[in-house]
Amino acid sequence: MLELTVGIISDFALAICTLFVMLAAVAAWWRQKPYTRKDFSEAMERICEGASKLCSLQDEVLFCRSAVAGAALKAECYSILKDMLQNTCFIVERADACFSSDLSRNANDAEIHRRANVVVRRGLPLILRVRWSLLRLGFSPAPATCQRTLDAAQDYARLWSAVIGFLEARFPGCRERLAAAV
């Protein structure tokens, strides 16, 4: 009888804790401001700048074994992963809207639909990988953290190749305009 009572009380306590965590997550989500194109482009700049900084910090950690450099490396990894997560969610949300919408099924719309599907298929696993890397960030040594960040960055680059293909299908001549802008 005592075991049953303790089991019921612990299950009830676990359910209440889960409810509070869910409420806190909803409150945080509700208070979050919308992610804009400006936020997206600023995050892209931080990712590009952070990648070169990441390589120099990684060399410093590997050769100097400095605790300060290790902390800086983890902070840089956190910043890059956070920006990649936000940008990937932004990309997948936009591509999913095209993927799930009813298209008139002419040849161009079918290609747009197919390419949006590729973007979503590459983006969703990347979101899970980046979230997992963010979770493990506090428990891993700096070189392992850096390696996971670099692996996620490679997947992010692959996602961008799919995004460019999607944009080219959606807006013919987009590749030339992108090359001219760079």
Image (cartoon, rainbow, N blue to C red):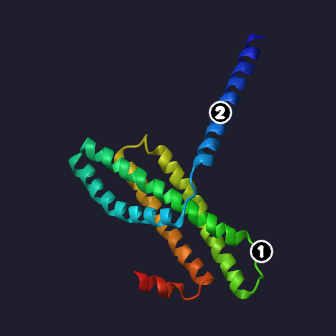
Residue 128 horizontal side relative to residue 4, left or right: left
Dot 1: what SS? loop
Q: Position of residue 53 (x, y in %)?
A: 31, 59
Alpha-carbon neighbours of circle 1 within 10 Å: few (<14), some, or many (≥20)?
A: few
- Tag shown at residue 102: 1
Residue 40 horizontal side relative to residue 117, left or right: left
Identity, as a three-letter code, of the amino acid under mark 1:
Asp
Residue at 68%, 68% (x, y): give it: 97
**Relative to 20, does residue 135 appear above or below in the rendering?**
below
Identity, as a three-letter code, of the amino acid under mark 2:
Phe
- Tag shown at residue 20: 2
Question: Which quadrant of the view contains residue 88?
Answer: bottom right
Q: Nearer the viewer, residue 79 or 125?
A: 79
Dot 2: what SS? helix
Residue 52 horizontal side relative to residue 123, left or right: left
> In which quadrant of the rendered image does the C terminus lie?
bottom left
Residue at 66%, 79% (x, y): give it: 112
Cα–Cα span, label 1 and label 2: 39 Å
Alpha-carbon neighbours of circle 2 within 10 Å: few (<14), some, or many (≥20)?
A: few
**Relative to 37, does residue 81 appear above or below in the rendering?**
above
Residue at 66%, 38% (x, y): give it: 23
Mark 1 or mark 2: name the one nearer the start of the chain. 2
Contact check, label 1 and label 2, Cβ < 8 Å? no
Q: Going by the picture, which residue comes out furthest to the left?
A: 64
Number of numbered discs overlaid on the protein picture: 2
Residue at 39%, 55% (x, y): give it: 147
